[in-house]
Image (cartoon, rainbow, N blue to C red):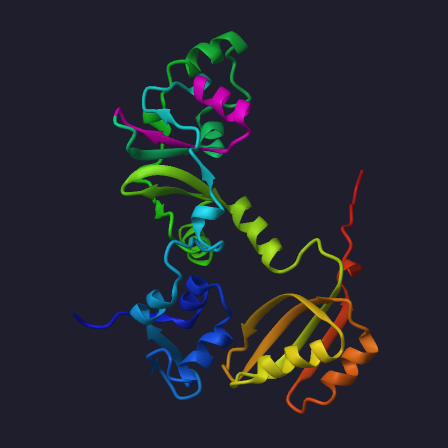
Amino acid sequence: MSEEWISTQEAAQQLGITTARIRQLVAEKKINAQKVGGKYRGQWLVSASDIAQRIPKGVSTQMNVKNRMTPNPITASQQTNYNQALRLMQQNNIKHLPIVDNHDKLIGIVTYNDMLRAEPSPVTSLSVFEIASLLEKVTMKQIMNHPVLAIEETCSIANAAKFMLDNDIGCLPVVRDDALVGIITDTDIFKTFVEITGGGQAGTRLEAKVPDQKGQLAALTQALTDAGAYIVSVAISYDDSGDYSYVDLKERGGDEQKIRAELGKLDNVEVLEIRPSDGDQLHSFGK
């Protein structure tokens, strides 16, 4: 059977480590890898089987959908009418309602926006009672979206987010052996993003530009450690050329002058910004 290859980002998500660490394992020949594309703009692909062997057995990573989804979601049937579905959404404070068949198999989904589109126009001449009677006859079979896109509970949070963006949807039902076991929404994704980037925690936000080369991230974090900083979170993005990476890092406990002094010792690090994480403010306009 031919080898299956995955990106360094996918590998990092599966192991719960950084892409820099993945590249280090490749350099140490502990993971098989191949480079595709140009010499400078190319991308490393790593062996999926090598990564799978490194996942601790019996451990469910926190960055999998299983640990971020809402389990056992509220569902409705094709025969559920509009008023019943609306009550389910309001009583349970949800905006997505999976639709299942008589065998509890997922067959569709209805969103709150679907419900709004099914209502009569605000300028209708119908009375409130006539509208309620009319909606009583509207079933989920008539307004549900199908076929419905879904993911396995082992899917990574990063891939779940990408699937939502690619398909312009706000949620994904989660299945196990074709059985519905949960649902993950864009709100869950946002919560995860805030958590992994240290949002809400006190500290200092640092952004630096470094060459996309082996050892650069290690040197940066070591410099911060030498300055007495405790690293809360690290996020990495890349420029279009692929030659540099941008490290967005949150730390607490370090002295800014010491941090700048230690980073100044690194020839390849360009400090773009250092400022307290509470420096951002939420503004309100209008009455």
From this view, report whether residue 176 is shown above or below residue 13: above
Residue 9 location in percent, x, y? Answer: 44, 68
Side of 231 relative to 244 (left or right): right
Residue 151 location in percent, x, y? Answer: 35, 48
Of 75 and 50, the residue lying toward us = 50
Side of 248 relative to 54 (left or right): right
Q: Residue at x 46, y 58 (%)?
A: 158
Of 43 and 216, the residue lying toward us = 216
Q: Residue at x 73, y 72 (%)?
A: 229
Number of labelled discs? 0
From this view, report whether residue 158 is shown above or below residue 108: below
**Residue span colored magenta:** 84-102
Of 52 and 39, the residue lying toward us = 52
Of 201 and 135, the residue lying toward us = 201
Does residue 99 show up magenta in the picture?
yes
Q: Residue at x 35, y 75 (%)?
A: 46
Query: In which quadrant of the rendered view does residue 281 lie?
Result: bottom right
Q: Quadrant of the N terminus?
A: bottom left
Residue 78 location in percent, x, y? Answer: 32, 24
Q: Residue at x 44, y 64 (%)?
A: 15
Residue 234 location in percent, x, y? Answer: 61, 68
Does residue 281 show up magenta in the picture?
no
- In the picture as drawn, the residue positioned furthest to the bottom comes out as 267
Query: In which quadrant of the rendered view does residue 36 lie?
Result: bottom left
- In the picture as drawn, the residue positioned furthest to the top comes out as 129
From this view, report whether residue 244 is shown above or below residue 107: below
Side of 94 relative to 233 (left or right): left
Q: Quadrant of the C terminus?
A: top right
